[in-house]
Amino acid sequence: MTPIATVDLTRIGFINALFTATSATCVTGLIVLDTATRFSAFGKTVIMCLIQVGGLGIMMLGYFTAFLVGMKLTYQDKMTISYMLDEVDTTKFARDLRGIVLLTFLIESAGALMLYPAFLKNQGSFLGGAFYSIFHAVSAFCNAGFALFTDNLASFHSSALVSMVIAILVIAGGISFAVLINSFSFMKSSFERGVLKQSKRIVKMSLNTKVVLSATAILLVAGTLFIYKVEHKPSLLSYDIKTQYLMAFFQSVTLRTAGFNTMDISSLHIATYTLMILFMFIGGASGSCAGGIKVNTVGVIWAYVKSIFNNRDDVVLFRHSVSKDLINQAFMVMFLSLCAVFTGALILSLTENKKFIRIMFEVTSAFGTVGLSTGITQELTGIGKVVITVLMFIGRLGPLTVIAALSRKTGQYPVQYPQGKISIG
């Protein structure tokens, strides 16, 4: 809200400042003010720092700081980190947390270096090119979708360098640190044993990693082919074949988590909007910078539905049985997420004079912390901006976290009620 944060040294108001700060911290990317032209270098730096904190996770940064200053953590704290890192051995927490922060900065630095030639040419100065490279590398890896261009990245639609580097950063940030570490350890173990013939401990790919990588690959390919097919004539036909597939792939990558765009989102086909809404609702992986109900949740639900069709009592996923508690959590996440999206869409339908498909797109993008918009974000009323802000906050924390924080603990009652029958279907 400070005047120094804007180019013309004017205050942007509380609602707009809260919306921007929430969008950055929740790594969403929805904007009510043009980041490129309205904010000064100071304002853009504040946004980048909020993106970095939101991407790593405020809680994870807090734990990492606690380790640095030598604070002792409670057993409950350690169990929380265990869930976040998918690590059973609590003695490895300090090492893993340091590794996560170092890995984040290493990947972002590598991405910035690769983006630098393109942005140096665009900005024409060393400092300008460096700042733009760092900002977009942080925004991409943290799946934020903030860009320092008015048209987002549309002017780089034919640049394979920018598109592929941003896409790789988005994918890396959207599959979670646990998957990155497990995948790296698995490949290192396979190389040492298979190529170097060293007798070292076998590192297996975890069930979580298999689910995330498989689901991510399926969604990326399906999204690319669908967008290319539907948007070929209306949006892509005027470009060469390489650019057509590059734009379709880039949009398929970013629509689930990041919110960057090289296509004009406001002019897409309704069928494309529908697919995007579904993909944004699914999001990325648990424990990552991405939002949505997560591919892990979808994997568990898919395994359960498959077991019902196959008349199996047990739920199996990649030759691993899935517990009842995990299935219940998956369906609870999906149910609460649907409630949040439906409630937000209902309120915006009352306060905004926009088509429902655009409202639904906006609401899902906010809840999934994606950041794509059909162009109505800056035209929202004050109530609409508040609703989107709340949805971004809920989407970043996760519906289960919000419910757990607000709910009261109830005692156990030694009462068992008789079973009843209800007609279903």
Image (cartoon, grey):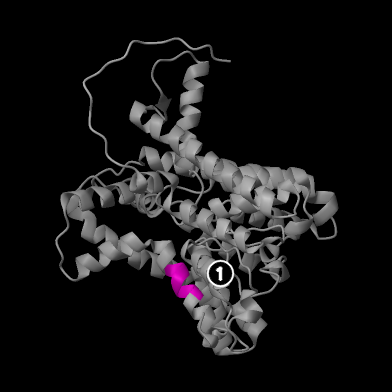
306 is higher (above) or lower (below) than 207: above
Point 71% across, 60% down: residue:
376
Q: In this view, does 257 lie to the left or right of 329?
A: right
Q: Is the magenta stretch mostly helix, strand or loop?
A: helix
* Residue linked to disc 1: 15
Point 42% across, 47% down: residue:
286
Is residue 208 among the parts visible in the rendering? yes
Q: In this view, does 195 lie to the left or right of 344?
A: left
Q: Quadrant of the C terminus?
A: top right
95 is higher (above) or lower (below) than 105: above
Q: Nearer the viewer, residue 187 or 1?
A: 1
Q: Which of 363 and 183 is in front in this view?
A: 363
**Span shown in magenta:** 47-52
Magenta stretch encompasses residue 161: no
Image coordinates of residue 160 in percent, x first then y, are: 66, 65
Is residue 118 among the parts visible in the rendering? no
Point 50% across, 15% down: residue:
310
Q: How many numbered circles are shown?
A: 1
Image coordinates of residue 306 in percent, x first then y, are: 50, 22
